[in-house]
């Protein structure tokens, strides 16, 4: 069968790559065309557009890049029509993918959504349209199945969280070599994948390194960004280094981490690393978001556990002084570290209930397509 998969950011590229691998196991004749990144391409997808050309963060940034976004939508629709896929598989990235889903349904294309948009947080009004244009929804957070069933009378399938298998597989491989050779304890800095968010958060994280000269701070470079982008940012910080393409190795060796909000907060927790969650956007974007978003927390760890497991420093609270205090707490309070490990264990158990997520999702997709052949 012919599959067309769209992911618009680094996490979608990761989960899309594992989905491609599992689809190819079940469907040996599969041809897969995709929007994503290096991982999806390496897994066997024919890459049309890289996510680094798609990712725009915040309300103001989207408005400023509207022309590019509209051109990408036009290109995507033309390419889908030309490739005549048996199904369109959309991975998160709702601003783009829900527009494509509505259009694809009008073209008579089977639409499968893997990794639900976070409509339970904001823009709930999207769900009515989603029900109309999405043929099958696969969700990865345990509370989403009940949310869609109870509130919207929509039967969706929970397949477990794909990060559990990714992290477990990495933990079961041989221990990585020492990334720094410094002999110091490591604090990981994960400032995000988009230029806008890196520029907002990384300078604050770097300032904290001056207060802990006995530690080695290591920046995880984003796969979609060039090395040259980081050079000016890191100058003048003697106990800071950087790695590229080794984020999981870094987390396996880290004593603590400062992490931008998003999927990385969950990855860090699954590796068992004490963390502080950091968020800072443009003031206008933040003020708009604060009025629209309805959730109690910004990190997936806290949302899934429905309690404050990891500290969140948001917008004006994200300062070097506050980060210093929180990092000191993580490093030097044994009770805090013990409680975190207990909560992390419960988190992993919750996310493992659906089984091996990528394999389950692929099997569900293939079975659905077989059951609905014309």
Image (tube, rainbow, N blue to C red):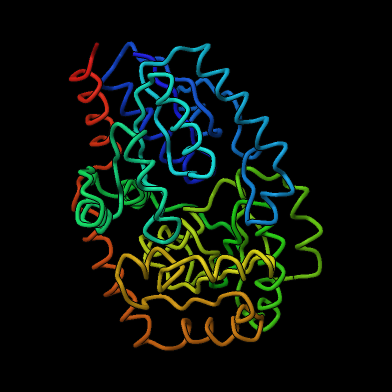
Count of numbered circles in the view: 0
In this picture, is 355 found above or below 46? below
Residue at (42%, 48%) from the top-left corner? 126
In this picture, is 61 found above or below 181? above
Image quadrant where one finds the N terminus: top left
Image quadrant where one finds the C terminus: top left
Residue 161 visible from this viewpoint: yes
Residue at (65%, 37%) from the top-left corner? 69
Residue at (44%, 43%) from the top-left corner? 92
Q: Position of residue 291 (x, y in %)?
A: 53, 70
Residue 186 visible from this viewpoint: no
Q: Position of residue 268 (x, y in %)?
A: 43, 62
* Observer-nearest of 310 and 372: 372
Residue at (53%, 57%) from the top-left corner? 178
* Observer-nearest of 317 and 37: 317
Q: Position of residue 371 (x, y in %)?
A: 18, 20
């Amino acid at each position: 069968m012919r599959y067309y998969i769209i992911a618009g950011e680094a996490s979608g590229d990761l989960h899309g790559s594992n989905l491609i691998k599992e689809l190819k196991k079940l469907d040996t004749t599969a041809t897969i065309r995709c929007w994503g990144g290096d991982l999806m391409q390496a897994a066997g997808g024919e890459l049309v557009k890289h996510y680094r050309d798609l990712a725009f963060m915040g309300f103001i940034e989207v408005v400023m890049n509207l022309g590019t976004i509209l051109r990408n939508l036009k290109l995507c629709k033309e390419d889908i029509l030309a490739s005549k896929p048996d199904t369109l598989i959309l991975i998160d990235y709702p601003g783009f993918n829900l527009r494509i889903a509505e259009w694809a349904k009008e073209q008579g294309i089977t639409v499968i959504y893997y990794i639900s948009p976070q409509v339970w947080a904001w823009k709930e009004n999207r769900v009515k349209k989603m029900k109309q244009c999405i043929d099958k929804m696969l969700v990865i957070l345990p509370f989403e199945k009940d949310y869609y069933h109870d509130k919207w009378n929509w039967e969706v399938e929970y397949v477990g969280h794909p990060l559990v298998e990714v992290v477990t597989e990495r933990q079961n491989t041989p221990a990585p070599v020492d990334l720094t050779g410094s002999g110091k304890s490591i604090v990981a800095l994960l400032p995000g994948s988009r230029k806008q968010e890196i520029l907002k958060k990384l300078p604050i994280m770097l300032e904290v390194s001056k207060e802990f000269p006995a530690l080695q701070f290591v920046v995880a470079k984003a796969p979609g960004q060039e090395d040259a982008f980081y050079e000016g940012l890191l100058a003048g910080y003697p106990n800071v280094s950087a790695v590229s393409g080794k984020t999981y190795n870094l987390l396996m060796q880290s004593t603590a981490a400062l992490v931008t909000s998003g999927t990385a907060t969950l990855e860090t927790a699954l590796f068992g690393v004490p963390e502080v969650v950091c968020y800072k956007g443009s003031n206008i974007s933040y003020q708009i978001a604060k009025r629209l978003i309805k959730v109690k927390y910004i990190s997936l760890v806290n949302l899934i556990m429905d309690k404050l497991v990891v500290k969140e420093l948001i917008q004006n609270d994200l300062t070097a002084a506050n980060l210093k205090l929180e990092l000191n707490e993580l490093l030097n309070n044994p009770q805090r570290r013990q409680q975190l490990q207990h909560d992390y264990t419960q988190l992993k158990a919750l996310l493992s209930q659906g089984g091996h997520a990528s394999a389950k999702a692929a099997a569900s997709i293939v079975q659905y397509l077989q059951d609905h052949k014309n």
